[in-house]
Amino acid sequence: MNDRPARPANPTHIGRVLRTEQLTDHMIRVTFGGEGLRDFATGPYTDSYVKLVFPRPGVDYPQPLDVAAIRRDRPRDQWPLTRTYTVRSFDPAGPELVIDFVHHGDTGLAGPWAASAAPGDELAILGPGGGYAPDPQADWHLLVGDESALPAIAASVAELPAGARARVFLEIGDPGEEQKLQPPAGEVDIVWVDRSSGGYGEALLAAVTAADLPAGTGQAFVHGEAHWVKSLRRHLRHERGMKPAQLSISGYWRRGADEDGWQAGKAEWNRRVEEEQEQAAA
């Protein structure tokens, strides 16, 4: 998942489900294809993301779907819902677009959809956007996230430059949620952090703040639940001395809020975080 602004054109694509795969108890992989993805392209980013469009039950939408026109012409309660997901991989030759969904039973919108998805089902897809890729000039890399950031981190690990030095910390609900990542030859340490005995981010923060990071100028990608991201931002900026240009860091979601609620208040949340941390550093 990523929340950077999408490309200005924000094109709409139609993805047709080709197959699904249960990766772990709580992660479902959906592979989309079809002619509706012929113009899809992810660009240079490893955190490419899309907005998946879910029609509201009982509302008829004109085809082809034009989300911008619907938002312009119809009341808000008829707008389709959107959910942001990171592109796990894209093969233009297919084309095949792979997206991994966290699934916790009937909770949420996109997870239950993925659990019931069948070949031939179609979904409108907006984007993509993106803004991060491992910098080959960095002396080392730090990648930190929870399940929501796992697809972006997995894609980024695969694209690390040969010989890279990297520290990767991934928080999961239990050891059964581990996935096999594919780092290049180099010094890439991958730590799976089990939060089953504590709250979101507690063990992850402890692991990262205690980590021995390499010398030199690093680059960090840190995304996940907003509260622990806030704490880790402070640590990296003020205790590790990393500059904003070295960081791709943001909350993908926040406890107690769905995506609609989080996105509505996210700009204000980020503004307050920046003010608090600047005051702390003064």
Image (tube, rainbow, N blue to C red):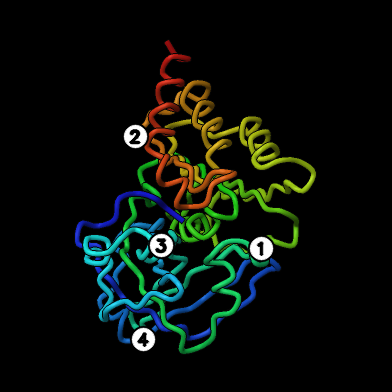
In the image, 5 versus 240, the foreground residue is 5
Answer with mark 2 or mark 1, whichever residue precedes in sequence: 1
Residue type for callout 4? Gly
Few, some or many residues within 10 Å of mark 3 (<14, 14–19, 20+): many
Residue type for callout 2? Ala
Asked which quadrant contains residue 71, the reply is bottom left
Q: Give the residue displayed 50% in from the left and 56% down from the top.
A: 157
Q: Which residue is mark 2?
A: 245
Q: Is residue 175 left or right of residue 104?
A: right
Q: Give the residue displayed 46% in from the left and 44% down from the top.
A: 221
Q: Are marks 3 and 2 in contact (CB under 8 Å)?
A: no
Residue type for callout 3? Thr
Q: Which residue is mark 4?
A: 34
Question: Which is closer to the viewer, label 4 or label 2?
Answer: 4
Q: Position of residue 241 (x, y in %)?
A: 46, 23
The secondary element bearing badge 2 is classed as helix
Q: Give the residue displayed 59% in from the left and 44% down from the top.
A: 256
Answer with mark 1 or mark 3, whichever residue precedes in sequence: 3
Q: Are marks 1 and 3 in contact (CB under 8 Å)?
A: no
CA distance separating discs 4 and 3 = 21 Å
Whether residue 166 is visible to the viewer of this picture, yes or no, is no
Residue placed furthest toward the right: 197
Question: Which is closer to the viewer, label 3 or label 2?
Answer: 3
Q: Which residue is mark 1?
A: 104
Few, some or many residues within 10 Å of mark 1 (<14, 14–19, 20+): few
CA distance separating discs 4 and 2 = 38 Å
Q: Which residue is mark 3?
A: 82
